[in-house]
Amino acid sequence: MTDVLGTPSRAGKIRFTVTYLEMTKRPERTPAPAPNTDIAIIQARKPPAHYYRYLFNTVGEPWLWTERRTVSDDNLAAILASPAVSLFVMHVAGVPAGFIELRRIDRHETNVDYFGLMPDFVGQRLGPHLLDFGIYRAWNDGAAKVTVNTCTLDHPKALKLYQRSGFIPVRRRDYEKDDPRLTGLLPRHVAPQHPIAEA
């Protein structure tokens, strides 16, 4: 396979480019409205590891998210119990449809660690509403800067969504890692938009 720059991935590896973005002032625009009235965004306080894994794995599998899959239940519970971490789950008609996870890096900066929708809810204009909820929550909680990053493995519209929401790219960096579909961390059939670089 090749990355967005056309550089071939080595066998067993996957190449991707990460864009780091930041927002240094509170948005002056009106938050994105909810596309329907049967939406609730609820904070999940100290959720059990299995519930978080359901959210993370279901949302992240199509985009090859792996970071939290390799964390032990005890360490994951500690992360989720941290007062610096806030997890908000969007429900549509009572069904989990996506989540956004915020982490206060210090008194002045909050990072959007994870944000995404369940596959069944992609394309329903829910993303801008959930993202804006997280952005305004960060500012209301005292942030002076909000940061996020996205990569070329994510949804192809992710970068544009962040920019429309007010984030500004500040740097980009290329990476390469073991393809998790070849290590057994993820099933081989996921993310067909990124072909596997076989030996």
Image (tube, rainbow, N blue to C red):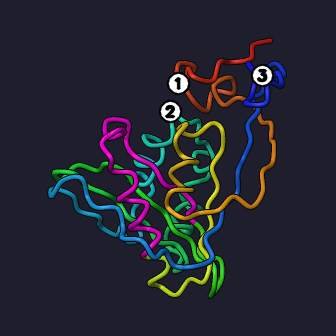
Point out residue 135 in the picture as x, y percentages from the top left corner: 47, 70
Closest to the camera, between mark 3 and mark 2, is 2
3D distance between C-alphas at marks 3 and 2: 18 Å
3D distance between C-alphas at marks 2 and 1: 6 Å
- On residue 12, which mark appears? 3
Residue 128: quadrant of the picture = bottom left
Q: Do the residues labelled 1 and 3 touch (CB within 8 Å)?
A: no
Image check: 14 left or right of 192?
A: right
Please report the bounds of the magenta region as a residue range: 112-136
Point out residue 58 in the picture as x, y percentages from the top left corner: 42, 40
Q: What residue does disc 1 label?
A: 190
In this view, the residue in front, 87 or 149, is 149
Residue at far top of view: 199
- At label 3, the amino acid type is Gly
Quarter containing the C terminus: top right
Q: What residue does disc 2 label?
A: 62
Image check: 139 left or right of 128?
A: right
Residue 119 lies within the magenta run: yes
- Sequence-wise, the earlier of marks 1 and 3 is 3
- At label 1, the amino acid type is Val
Q: Do the residues labelled 2 and 1 touch (CB within 8 Å)?
A: yes
How packed mark 3 is, by other alpha carbons closer than 10 Å (few <14, some 14-19, many 20 or more), is some
- At label 2, the amino acid type is Pro
- Residue at image point 61% right, 32% down: 185
Q: Is mark 2 on a helix, strand or loop?
A: helix
